[in-house]
Image (cartoon, grey):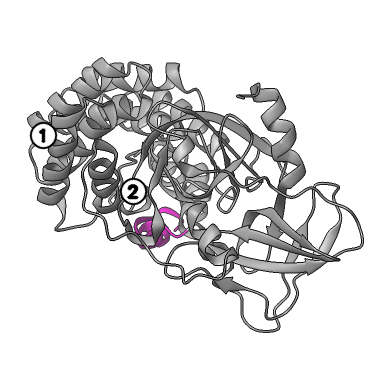
Amino acid sequence: MAQSAEAVAKVAQTITVRIEGATQGSGVLVKRDGNRYTVLTAWHVVSGQRPGEELDIYTPDGQRYKLEQGSIKRLGQVDMAVLTFTSSSSYEVASVGDVKSVSSGSSIYVSGYPLPTSAVPSRVFRFMKGDVIANAMVAIPDGYQLLYDNQTLPGVSGGAVLNAQGRLVGIHGKAEKADQISESSGKAIATGTNQGMPISYYKQYASGEAVTTSSAQALTADDYLAQAKGLSGKKGSEQEVIRLATQALAIRQSAEAYFNRAYAKNDLGDKQGAIADYSQAIAINPQLAQAYNNRGNIKRDLGDKQGAIADYNQAIAINPQHFKAYYNRGNAKDDLGDKQGAIADYNQAIAINPQHANAWGARGLAKLQLGDRYGACEDTRKSASLGSPVAQRYLPKVCQ
């Protein structure tokens, strides 16, 4: 029987752990054998660990345990790994479910420990509600067959993906797949789809089988959609993404298929086609903030600054934490000569995400144009420290 979200949250809190090592992430308690506990997480959370390096596991009661050295094992070629620690305390372990229990539109929950922010300066447990976008039965790179729309945050990778019964059906992998690539060009483009690995891979491992991916051919809308998502943002794959998204749409209309197709069309320079597909996505799901944000970017590219601002306004109204929309709206206001309005939006973007190098850099430029050279220097220096190559190039001129 389905449980209330509150009941599932209680389950999630008892089985989710915080991982602190070479990379910070989350994990799930999945097995107890005497005093030895097994944690299931995402491979990319622990793949950077070198032999002998410390890795700490923080259990739900706040206790810290050391990794059992040599216990990290990757599951096949998917983004999953297990590790162990020992404790005489008694902790709950996850009830492993069947990934086939969820399908497009099903309620799904993700739990984990996000990285600190200016608003929340420590890693605090978070439980995020959402819906399944797709549950593919075909092989996807890294095992990312589960797609869902929960509002996840950095640091949650490796956390639990639970069904409505509170059973573990997957491990959270990552969100905003193509975002860092797009931000390197100065545009913040949100993809809005989270990706996870189905629990079936852990079941293979736990039963002693070799962990292998499916050899089935794509047949369902979910299969085509997950394949399209797996290629989205990869240069040279745009036409294949369009083909796969179109195949998915031929079987079932979905906002996500239109979204992925729009993303690829924009990468190919078909801006009007991309706007049309983002508009279709919005018509199906008016709460898709990322579609408004991305459509706004294209309108800005085409010179429609006011139309772009209107779309960013919609994205922010839907998701007040959408720092990319604040940043993009700031750029559009700057285009129109509204430097103070632009700075106000960059302030909001930075408050939500202090690691957003481009927002620091853009605010510095706006301050410079208003004659605030000291403020411009400080912001440019911060942007450069966060890795912006543009800020690093202009730093000597701004701070002369």
Element type where label 1 sits in the image: helix
Residue 140 in sight from this viewpoint: yes
Q: Position of residue 69 (x, y in %)?
A: 72, 79
Q: Position of residue 178 (x, y in %)?
A: 33, 49
Q: Nearer the viewer, residue 350 or 274?
A: 274
Which mark's residue is nearer the viewer, 1 or 2? 2
Q: Nearer the viewer, residue 324 or 176?
A: 176
Asked if residue 259 lies in the magenta stretch, the reply is no
User: Which portion, as a residue range, is magenta?
Assistant: 387-400
Residue 305 in sight from this viewpoint: no
Query: Which of the labelled discs sits on residue 137, or is there none?
Result: 2
User: For the point 27% across and 19% down, which residue is it?
Assistant: 282
231 vs 399, left or right, is left
Q: Quadrant of residue 396?
A: bottom left
Asked if residue 399 lies in the magenta stretch, the reply is yes
Q: Quadrant of residue 73?
A: bottom right
Query: Which of the labelled discs sits on residue 299, or is there none?
Result: none
Of callouts 1 and 2, which one flags the residue occurring earlier in the amino acid sequence? 2
Q: Nearer the viewer, residue 122 or 257?
A: 257
User: For the point 47% across and 50% down, which residue is it?
Assistant: 198
113 vs 162, left or right, is right
Q: Residues within 10 Å of mark 1 (few under 14, many from 20)?
A: many
Residue underneath mark 1:
271
User: For the point 28% across and 61% down, which residue is it?
Assistant: 215
Pointers 1 and 2 in contact (CB under 8 A)?
A: no
Give the alpha-carbon distance from disc 1 to disc 2, as whole Å. 32 Å
Q: Looking at numbered disc 2 in the image, what kind of residue is underneath it?
A: Met
Q: Nearer the viewer, residue 58 or 251?
A: 251
Q: Looking at numbered disc 1 in the image, what kind of residue is underneath it?
A: Lys
